Image (spheres, grey):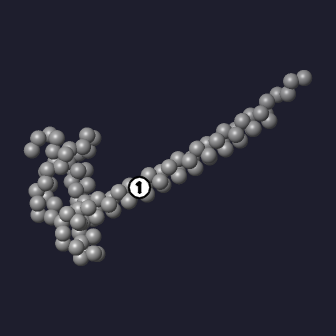
Amino acid sequence: MNNHEYEAKVRGRVIKFPAVDGLTELELGSIVAQVEEKINKIEAKLNIVDTSKLAILAAYDFAVELNNLKQRSETNREADSRKVEEMVGSLEAALGAEAPQEK
């Protein structure tokens, strides 16, 4: 195994995963465990034994989760931007009201 691979056992098979910059082996192991857990849940729920189909369904499920997180993040970002604009407007109004009037 070189520095660009992470080796782990998934469903009884040793697989070499590409290393990911910034992630430790412990973090990579956690990710692989999540993949295996997802595969096991799908297998139990749908009673599928085809490993390829399970892998595709697990990838699909993770992609759906990622899409939902992206949408939620975008919604939160837009709400945050609106709130900041409201706060800036309130601050400008407050500062404008406190400014000394020229005579």
Would you identify the image quadrant in which residue 18 lies?
Answer: top left
Q: Look at 20% across and 44% down and name the residue there.
A: 19
Q: Nearer the viewer, residue 31 or 48?
A: 48
Left or right position of 73 against 46: right
Q: Residue furthest right?
A: 103
Q: How many marks?
A: 1
Q: Look at 43% across and 57% down and name the residue there.
A: 68
Q: Which residue is mark 1?
A: 67
- Amino acid type shown at disc 1: Asn
Height in image: 71 above or below 61? above
Residue 37 visible (yes or no): no
Q: Nearer the viewer, residue 14 or 101?
A: 14
Where in the figure is residue 41, as x and y percent of width and height? 27, 70
Would you identify the image quadrant in which residue 46 lies?
Answer: bottom left
Answer few, some or many: residues within 10 Å of disc 1's Cα (few below 14, many 20 plus, some between 14 and 19).
Answer: few
Q: Look at 16% across and 41% down and name the residue there.
A: 4
Height in image: 31 above or below 92? below
Where in the figure is residue 55, as x and y percent of width and height? 23, 62
- Considering the image in quadrants, where does the C terminus appear? top right
Q: Nearer the viewer, residue 103 or 53?
A: 53
Where in the figure is residue 90, as x and y percent of width and height? 71, 41
Q: Nearer the viewer, residue 45 or 102?
A: 45
Secondary structure at numbered mark 1: helix
Left or right position of 97 against 53: right
Where in the figure is residue 40, as x and y percent of width and height? 23, 69
Q: Residue furthest top?
A: 103
- Considering the image in quadrants, where does the N terminus appear? top left
Residue 85 visible (yes or no): yes
Height in image: 98 above or below 37? above
Left or right position of 78 against 42: right
Left or right position of 100 against 65: right
Would you identify the image quadrant in which residue 14 lies?
Answer: bottom left
